[in-house]
Image: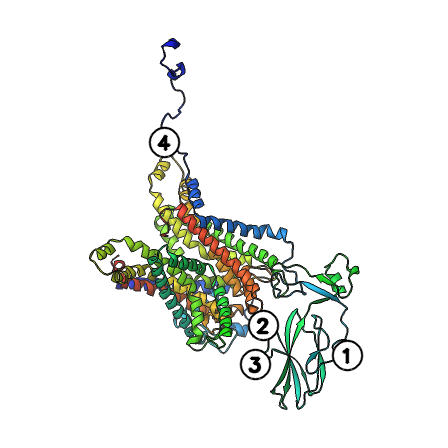
Amino acid sequence: MWQYTLKRLLQGVITVWFIATATFLAMHNVPGDPLSGGRAISPEIRANLEARYGLDKPLSQQYVQYLGNLLRGDFGISFTQQNRQVNDIIREHFPVSATLGILAVLFAALGGVLWGALTALYRNRLPDTIIMFLVILGISVPSFVFAALGQLALVNLNALIGVSLLPVAGWGGVSHMILPALVLGMGTMAYLTRLMRSSMLEIQHSDYLRTARAKGLPPARIFTRHQLRNAILPVITVLGPAIAAITTGGFVVELVFAIPGLGRYFVQAVQQLDYTVIMGTTVFYGAFLVFMVIVVDLLYGWIDPRVRLQ
Amino acid sequence: MNQHDLPQGLSAEDFQPLTGRDPVQGIHRPSRSYWQDAWARLRRNRRALLSLWIIVALLAFALIGPALWRVDPARQDIDQISQGPLADRTATVVAPYSAWNGRAAAGFESGSGLRLAQDGTSQAVRLLWDAVPGAGALRLYRNIFAVEADMAFGLPIAEFATGAAGFYEDRLDLRPGTYYYSLVALNEDRSLSDRHEVLPVEVTRVITLDEVRARALVPDATVLAEGDEVKLALHPLGTDYLGRDMLARLMAGAQVSLFIGIVAPVLYVLLGVLYGSTAGFLGGRVDQGMMRFADFVVALPFLLFMILFQVVFGIGPGESGIAPMLAALVLLAWPATARLVRGQILQIRHQAWISASRLLGAPDWYLVLRHMIPNTLGVILVTLTFAVPSAIFTEAFLSFIGMGVAPPTASWGSMSNEGLATMLTHPHELIFPALFISVTVLAFNLLGDGLRDALDARMRSLE
């Protein structure tokens, strides 16, 4: 297990290095001039600016410096907001995105397992048909449509009741998080429901279930102890990619709901061509996602002994 | 031999030796190829077949639609901005605008408080009011929603230094519908007092003769007189916030979205097939190295790098931004197919019929092209079908956050983004493109499910 963990971590570090290098090369090929911002500047000013950002050095030296800074966890200074460090921006905005993301993942995982188990129990009956129809809708409707429709529904609901049930946009208390987290987790929940359902159906004819039934265990106990626990395993494996999907899906949801998260900040930085912020957040998100996948894989090995033995 | 000697019912022909290979006995059914078999299975799947028809209809909408509905998707109709589908499009012909002296028109002389000086039209809303005693100043507001207790007055459009009787002519971007004008008395310190008066005004659409002529709305404008009604240009699905025809834009958007959604997956699945089959066929060190590289590309956070590549490729002035998006999709999305195809090729590589073909002297390229790839074609086709919705999603996502196609190019994603701003007042601008995205993705997903069931028994889903 330790060897496996170490191997995965090493792979993760190499992947993050690859992401950092790809980001560095990509950003150095961006057309246009990051310094002038459309204005004509004199050669002296240009030289000063280049020295400040280290752009006067050869590319290889810049690369080494960039990697050195990354190792020390220093992402540099924002191009458009000169008094802000990228680290500060991440420190300030990432917790918001993370809170939203954790809520969305929780909602998606719990909902997925619950609905999936329910559809498998009521296979080919009315609840199954209804939920599976909703699942197909959930997979086919883009998150920004959910976000917009959710907002629209909430506006009308608030107007109908006469009191503000939930805030329509913004960030603050728990009440602000509910609708965005629901919207953000919707697609993943639909996907997990589908997975959970087929996983439940797959083990329905397994030997250990037959044994449990033959022993005369009560059906409720078979369902919770034997069927549900084993069916959840495949759901855990896809949690890693699901976290990635929810993180990037957050860009849109944060934009629509005006939530001051890192995703919205990243989109704004891209629109303003804020090079250091783009590079910093890409590497940060990349590293975050890579290690989330590793954590989920290790968790899986811890939960399912069969994986550990392989 | 003589005819009389034969038993009854038999003739001399029955004793002729058989020449051809006519099967004498046996249970027959026409032999069916793998693809015929798959098609038969697909045809039994109602949902998949319906999806196939929807996809055909969508393609027709994108390709044949613009030939039938010849409206320029970029042309603005400034008479009809943000009009809903099937909205009333009559306009009354009126005289050209002339300046107003603040006097009420015939029939509007009586009345008190805030009142109209003539019927509200899209040309002008002319308001009159009596002196408000005790008011230091007055401010006039306009709202498109009814002003009730605790509700905002809306847009402040004019302010007057005294509380005396006065008049005001509103010509600011008037559209047919109801406007709520509020005249609010201000205190000495310019803060709002609680005295106000609200006047709902019904604005009707009017048009001058010159405008009728300029827009060629009727064949012969000379027969028109003031007070006649003309029909404005038809927009079956309404117009967007710039007065562009929604139907034409949806068709143009369908071309862009479906082009990216279909061409990008075809390109990257092809690239993946080439890469994967090369790796799988060569095997050994080369295979290891190639697949390690693919693993790294898989590890790149997809949407982040899509955005990054969009920045790197850049969209020049006058470009649509379709090419950068295709390039970015192809660069990032190929490894999944490559892995899949490599796995399939590794399975097939040691099959007996491959060895047989090799024994017969088949060169490597022949083995790959004739035997290996055709045998993975089913899997590739299923991958391709599932790749289409994800490509359409990606395009919509990027266009929605403003990193996709550049305006004025329409795509369903960029249309949804534009529609979001006017969602509360004109929901059709968001709902139509969103509906198209959802239906397309749904159709391709269901078709993919059906194809998977039809083509590959091993991948068949548990339904």
* Callout 2 and callout 1 share a chain: no
Q: Which residue is mark 1?
A: B101
Mark 4 or 3: in front is: 3
Tell me if mark 1 has few (under 14), some (14-19) or many (20+) residues whose alpha carbon lies within 10 angstroms of its own: few
Q: Which residue is mark 3?
A: B149
- Cα gap from disc 2 to disc 3, whole angstroms: 62 Å
Tell me if mark 2 has few (under 14), some (14-19) or many (20+) residues whose alpha carbon lies within 10 angstroms of its own: few
Label 1 SS: loop
**Amino acid of disc 2:** Pro
Using the image, determine if residue B360 lies above or below residue A216: above
Using the image, determine if residue B375 lies above or below residue B411: above
Q: In the image, which disc is placed on residue A43?
A: 2
Label 2 SS: helix
Q: Which residue is mark 4?
A: B27
- The mark that comes first in sequence, 4 or 3, is 4
Label 4 SS: loop
State the residue in front, A46 or B360. Answer: B360
Residue B349 in the image: state x and y as whole percent.
Answer: 35, 43
Residue B333 in the image: state x and y as whole percent.
Answer: 45, 56
